[in-house]
Image (cartoon, rainbow, N blue to C red):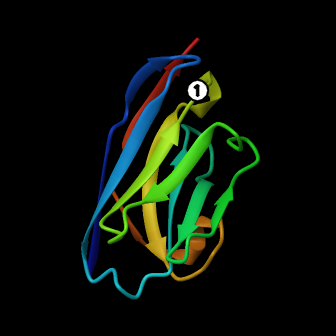
């Protein structure tokens, strides 16, 4: 079993930065991909950034050049550095883990509880 616990969310003004963390627990050895997803009120959950065990990354067009996904060497912690934040980045952010390299949320089996990010103008 795998458990994911996010932290680092909060409130920030537009143009500011936040760093999200996702601690992993359990049998993560076989997992190929880990990623960040977000869901704003009234909207569907969308993929933000994904990273694989061999370091490949993928980003949503809306965050390219502003967000960076990374992980520590032991894959115990996943990170999302968010810079130049915009009000439209406001959402609940979730980390997820699975076996496919995709931004499609339905392909991920394990999910955290989420951490709220609020960006004010």
- Using the image, determine if residue 44 lies above or below residue 11: below
**Among the 4 quarters of the image, the one containing residue 78:** bottom left
Left or right: 59 in relation to 100? right
Label total for image: 1
Q: Quadrant of the N terminus?
A: bottom left
Residue at horizontal 51 percent and vertical 62 percent from the top:
35
- Using the image, determine if residue 64 lies above or below residue 88: below
Looking at the picture, how far across and down is residue 99, in whole percent? 53, 83
- SS type, badge 1: loop
Q: Quadrant of the C terminus?
A: top right
Residue at horizontal 45 percent and vertical 42 percent from the top:
92
Residue sitting at the far top: 121
- Using the image, determine if residue 36 lies above or below residue 90: below
Few, some or many residues within 10 Å of mark 1 (<14, 14–19, 20+): many
- Asked whether residue 38 is in view, the answer is yes
Left or right: 21 in relation to 88? left
Residue sitting at the far right: 61
Residue sitting at the far left: 26
Looking at the picture, how far across and down is residue 37, in whole percent? 54, 54
Left or right: 81 in relation to 61? left
Residue at horizontal 42 percent and vertical 51 percent from the top:
79
Left or right: 81 in relation to 84? left
Residue at horizontal 49 percent and vertical 41 percent from the top:
81
Looking at the picture, how far across and down is residue 71, in whole percent? 42, 61
Viewer-nearest residue: 68 or 118? 68
Q: Which residue is mark 1?
A: 85
- Asked whether residue 113 is in view, the answer is no
**Among the 4 quarters of the image, the one containing residue 84:** top right
Looking at the picture, how far across and down is residue 11, in whole percent? 40, 22
Viewer-nearest residue: 3 or 17? 17
Residue sitting at the far bottom: 30
């Amino acid at each position: 079993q795998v458990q994911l616990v996010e932290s680092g969310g909060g409130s920030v003004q537009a143009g500011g930065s936040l760093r999200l963390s996702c601690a992993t627990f359990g049998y993560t050895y076989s997992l190929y991909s880990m990623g960040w997803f977000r869901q704003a009120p009234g909207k569907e959950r969308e993929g933000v950034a994904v990273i694989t065990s061999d370091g490949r990354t993928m980003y949503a067009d809306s965050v390219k050049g502003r967000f960076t996904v990374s992980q520590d060497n032991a894959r115990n912690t996943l990170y999302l550095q968010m810079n130049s934040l915009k009000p439209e980045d406001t959402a609940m952010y979730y980390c997820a883990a699975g076996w496919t390299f995709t931004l499609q949320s339905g392909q991920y089996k394990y999910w955290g509880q989420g951490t709220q990010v609020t960006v004010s103008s």
